[in-house]
Image (cartoon, rainbow, N blue to C red):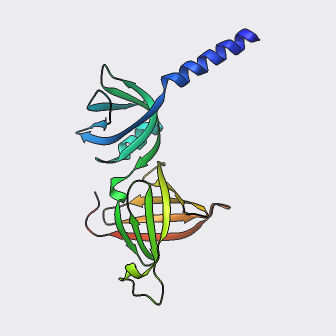
């Protein structure tokens, strides 16, 4: 029994020490995806170890940020990605307009929501006190991305899907999983 425990402990320790956190910015060159980070290699060729990581990596664009689990081989300048934990989507940054209000995405972790009130002209968002959110984005199946939005009191689960002209954000009730609101978001300029 002790030898089995020793073998299992050794195996799990070896696996845990082999994988580490990877952070970087996505750089696309043709069909190849690279991570630009702060290691000895300027660019790490991103490879994946499973279908989920492959699908998530293929959805990312130039300039997106990735936090993943995997291993780095400095000798060959490659990163073998096992799991993509969080992403920062460059196309999400900026101001998004909907009939419910304005969403201003400041960076890969903070956003503000300026709700439209009947007594305020929707173009005058400066007069509205925004709801401040911390958020994170994770990959999902298909074309959607999963968002976790936290204000000072609650955490909300949402999904977002981008198209050429707009984005659709679905907000879910955390207790029953039902959709509570669908926001059709328009961004000034083009989505990339």
Is residue 141 toward the left or the right of residue 178 in the image? Answer: left
State the residue lying farthest toward the left.
30
Q: Residue at x 29, y 61 (%)?
A: 191
Image quarter in which the N terminus is found:
top right
State the residue lying farthest toward the top.
3
Q: Position of residue 75 (x, y in %)?
A: 31, 19
Q: Position of residue 17 (x, y in %)?
A: 52, 22
Q: Residue at x 44, y 74 (%)?
A: 114
Vertical comparison of 171 with 19: above or below = below
Q: Position of residue 88 (x, y in %)?
A: 39, 50
Image quarter in which the C terminus is found:
bottom left
Q: Position of residue 96 (x, y in %)?
A: 37, 69
Q: Is residue 113 visible?
A: yes
Is residue 8 toward the left or the right of residue 56 in the image? Answer: right
Vertical comparison of 155 with 97: above or below = above
Vertical comparison of 37 with 11: above or below = below
Q: Residue at x 25, y 67 (%)?
A: 189
State the residue lying farthest toward the bottom.
119
């Amino acid at each position: 029994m002790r030898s089995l425990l020793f073998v299992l402990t050794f195996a799990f320790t070896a696996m845990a020490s082999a994988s580490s956190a990877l952070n970087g910015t996505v750089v696309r060159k043709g069909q190849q995806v690279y991570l630009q980070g702060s290691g000895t290699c300027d660019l790490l060729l991103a490879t994946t170890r499973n279908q989920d990581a492959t699908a998530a990596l293929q959805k990312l664009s130039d300039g997106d940020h990735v936090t993943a689990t995997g291993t780095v081989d400095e000798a060959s300048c490659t990163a073998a990605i096992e799991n993509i934990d969080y992403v920062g989507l460059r196309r999400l940054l900026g101001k998004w307009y909907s009939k419910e209000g304005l969403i201003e995405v400041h960076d890969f972790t903070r956003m503000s929501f300026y709700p439209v009130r009947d007594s305020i002209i929707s173009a005058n968002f400066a007069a509205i006190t925004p709801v401040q959110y911390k958020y994170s984005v994770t990959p999902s199946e298909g074309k959607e991305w999963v968002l976790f939005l936290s204000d000072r009191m609650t955490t909300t689960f949402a999904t977002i899907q981008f198209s050429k002209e707009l984005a659709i954000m679905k907000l879910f009730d955390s207790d029953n999983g039902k959709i509570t609101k669908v926001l059709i978001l328009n961004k000034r300029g083009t989505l990339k």
